Amino acid sequence: MGCCVSTSSRSTCSSGSNGDMATPSCLEIGFCGKKRARRTFSDHVISLHHLSSLPSRIFTNGKSRGSCIFTQQGRKGINQDAMVVWEDFMSEDMIFCGVFDGHGPQGHLVARKVRDTLPVKLLSFLHSYESKRNGSAKACLKRNLKSDGGDSEKDMSSEDKLNSTWKEAFMKAYKAMDKELSSHPKLDCFCSGSTSVTIVKQGSNLFMGYIGDSRAIMGSKDSNDSMVAIQLTVDLKPDLPREAERIKQCKGRVFALQDEPEVSRVWLPFDDAPGLAMARAFGDFCLKEYGVISIPEFSHRLLTDRDQFIVLASDGVWDVLSNEEVVEIVSSAPTRSSAARILVNSAAREWKLKYPTSKMDDCAVVCLFLDGKMDSESDYEEQGFSSATIQSNHSGNPIESDDGQKSEPSLQRNFTVRSSEENEINGAVSVDVEDGTAPADDQNWLGLEGVTRVNSLVQLPRFSEERSKSNS
């Protein structure tokens, strides 16, 4: 319920990253008519405890063959953002990228759990589909040889099959992820959760699944060779008409507080809590009966030679930078490997300038360059990175363990924070409650300090507090 699928007007297969197109007879998962070796599912999927040892997977500040990632802790407590890039995902021309923004007392643990588990679940469903095909690659090759380019009906059916396959894989993976969180013995997701924006690039095809308000955009060149920003996802906020309608039909309530009229929230029918500032999320099971869902939006896009890079980021970036500003920052970075770090640093500066009385939010960024090229190692180190940087979180946090109807996207900032001027007019402040850990002495904050950051959650429900006491 509540799932909207959008696809590009035409989809074709590609023999390379942005190369020549071929008929889309069997692009669904693997290769068709290619002699290059393919890794099998068993080659890829290993124990979650060994994910961090995969050379093609990065989840802490650093770079890969065609991407760079960076996260920085805000001033509200532990970093609740997580990110991952997994190259050679299922096959050698496939890349998985994701950003996850946790909220609630255990949001940081939820985000990390989703980061580690969701890609494996997606991989599992993709492999399951490929296994059912049972050697259909040969038949696919014969169809390609017989195709004269005029069989538009078959092409259309192949396009539909392509989208149906990937949509089903994303839907099943997200559903299985949320189900696992609901029964996790050590992770309480009753009032904690996470966003998720995930993409898989295979050749010229881009598949996207997402929930919450983390966002993906693309930097592309227009007909004048000028860089433009293209928003790939929609911020799934409670004030979107289709989201609000679903929530209200499930007896949930959607309204904004008087002191933050621009931020719609989801509330229980019988309590002014928790006030979740998104309509879809992993976890948050206190609201799952009242319209909040984990069913992802799915879309498919055909990439062109004009498309340069994709940026995935948490709302800590979008709260203070527009899509156009992000594209400008990334495209003008001195080296590609420094782009994610420079973008986070730019967001941090904007937080100080635009919201001097606010506690800066956590930021996480993934920059994927579509031509697959990166800088040399010497350029990388000149920009302030080192091998130690790749192995540790730049914000000072230790490396976390692995257990642990068509919309018009806005090109403006996310509007989940309000300025100090707005706060003075409204005469109210909000206090962060997202982090369940006790802050350090120098991170202590009170309402008198003028904290104006709008939280993903306002407060925990009364019965949630009683539930926690009974479990302890």
Image (tube, rainbow, N blue to C red):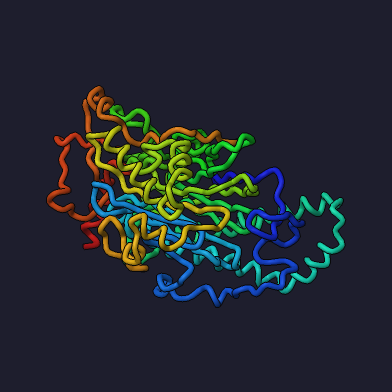
Q: Is residue 322 above or below residue 79?
A: above
**Furthest residue toward top:** 425
Front-most of 157 and 413?
413
Front-most of 293 and 45?
45
- Asked which quadrant contains residue 274, the reply is top left
Task: Give how far across and how far down residue 260 sits, in percent.
Answer: 31, 30
- Asked which quadrant contains residue 270, the reply is top left
- Asked which quadrant contains residue 222, the reply is top right
Q: Is residue 193 above or below residue 399?
A: above
**Furthest residue toward left:** 441
Task: Check the picture and name the quadrant holding the C terminus.
Answer: bottom left
Task: Give how far across and how far down residue 77 sits, in percent.
Answer: 23, 51
153 horizontally vs 127: left or right: right
Q: Is residue 272 above or below residue 50?
A: above
Task: Give how far across and how far down residue 34 sits, in percent.
Answer: 72, 69
Q: How many marks?
A: 0
- Residue 114 seen in this snapshot: no
58 horizontally vs 450: left or right: right
Task: Give how far across and how far down residue 219 sits, in percent.
Answer: 53, 43
